[in-house]
Amino acid sequence: MPNTPPSLFNTLTRRVEPLQPLAPPRVTLYTCGPTVWNYAHIGNFRTFLFEDLLRRWLERSGYDVFHIMNLTDVDDRTIKAARQAGKKLTAHTAPFTKAFFEDRDYLRIKPAHVYTPATEYMPQMIALVSKLLERGVAYKGEDGSVYFAIAKFPTYGRLSQLDRREIKVGARVASDEYAKGDPSDFAVWKKADAEDEAVGAAWDAPFGRGRPGWHLECSAMSLSEIAQCCGVQTLDIHAGGIDLIFPHHENEIAQSEGATGQQFSRHWVHGEFLNVRGTKMSKRHGNFLTARDLREQGIDAAALRLLFFQTHYRQSVDFTDEALEAATEGVGRLGEFHARLAESGKRETGDGPLGGLSVKLEQDVATALNDDLNAPRAVAVLFEFVRAANRELDKPEPPRSVARALEAFQQVAGKELLDVLPTRRAVDPATASWIDERIAARAQARKSKDFKAADAIRAELAAQGIDIEDTPLGTKWKAR
RNA sequence: GGCGCCGUAGCCAAGUGGUAAGGCAGAGGUCUGCAAAACCUCGAUUCGUCGGUUCGAUUCCGACCGGCGCCUCCA
């Protein structure tokens, strides 16, 4: 366990608070995943990336994280999309679920320990509805759907400060309003209609054939999973996008606590939006970009990771090509440094200033991330380390403490944490030996001062995506 | 209308009641046959505007201007 526990802003209290898991070192983490009606866009992935960093940091801090992510594969949008595609629900969502996993891997997001598709948790959801009905906090409406009675749940609205709100007149014109006791009551179970039946989105239940309300799945699946893994009814952290605070998370709390009588989640964290020219990226606005779009453009996922980590997760950020290019340059700098450090290690001769810089890097990164996951500061610290270390490596005397520096750098920038090192294009052995032959030829040309021929060879290599660099230790090459 | 967020150099973006991190871009320099990489130097007398509190505010309070989000099964 770390001496200083990580602190995070808690939406429940609107304050940055130390993380206080129910049973450390275990941390149960539930993150709201994608609705698999279509490809997720990079705005969605900004949230998943912030959660990825949170998870990695908790693990680095010594916690034993159990990470659950749901996949919403039955809701209004998936049903509508399936209907339009003329497919059954599952036939429509399955490819998008697969695509989500591909995108996740491309973006180097660590897989959750459990992915819970809503359609695979029908028994748990039906049981939860039954319990809510038994406890009298839910009721069957005149239309045959089951609603949660918020009047029976006095703390309703705490998360979103709803008690301090007024609903805009006319903002909530639900067609099923007549069926509900209170206009603000929300459906936990929706009576099946013809469209639901047509795509196979209807299940039998004691309280009538239908399908789960959107919020129900998160309550049922998270409670089911943490009961199974850890024997508890309270999550340590529940995370999602800021738009989910109301009504989604508010309703999850009502349903879960209404059923268990226990606090649903101790800590709530929400990530801000990714904007495009000031407006949130969304399917509705049509200003979105998917992860596969970036991959097709040959964008290194490291660049997107760095771009996102350079802004605090509770701050909205504008996505622009310029920003992505800037991040790509930054990632390149980290890659250059990494290669230089690895090369220098071969000539290491003992301890030196890089040791102290390494300790400082680790400490400063920890301080930054413990403070409400301040990734931008961690990134700044990383670049400060790069500059200071380069300065050391520029000195004429042989490098010292390089192994230590390499370890610290990789721990922060590499797979363990930020994961922002560039991926170099792989080169097959035949090409590699051709490159070596060309470089040797160029060296000959340079030796005989035939710079014209030397530059021609450099251009020839560049045309093949191979950049070369003359260093005191010889000519190096790298594939673009 | 209600609730909430934001406005810091050309662009992106941290931050603190005591005088402004980092990245990208730009200029000059060192090194180099050239290039690349790296390093050094330079840039906000200033943090939307106007007031207030304070010995002192970018940081706290108020007003205003500008942008955005949620209140519509949106990450």
Image (cartoon, coloured by chain):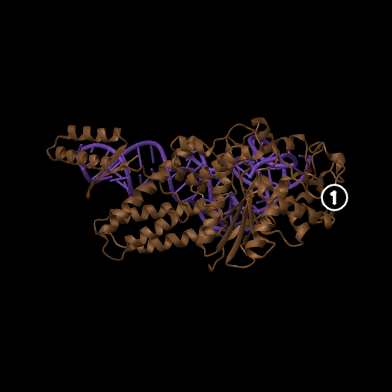
Residue A378 x/y as whole percent: 48, 54
Residue A449 x/y as whole percent: 13, 37
Relative to residue A472, is residue A468 depicted above or below?
above
The residue to which callout 1 is attached is: A139
Q: Which quadrant is the C terminus of chain A positioned in?
A: top left
Residue A250 x/y as whole percent: 73, 51
- Residue A40 appears in the rendering: no
Looking at the rendered structure, the kind of residue marked 1 is Tyr
Q: Which quadrant is the N terminus of chain A positioned in?
A: bottom right
Looking at the picture, tell me which residue is in the foreground, A101 or A152: A101
Q: Which chain did the image draw in purple?
A: B
Subunit of label 1: A
Q: Which chain did the image draw in brown?
A: A
Residue A133 x/y as whole percent: 83, 54
Looking at the picture, tell me which residue is in the foreground, A213 or A182: A213
Looking at the picture, tell me which residue is in the foreground, A158 or A91: A91
Q: Residue at x 21, y 40 (%)?
A: A439
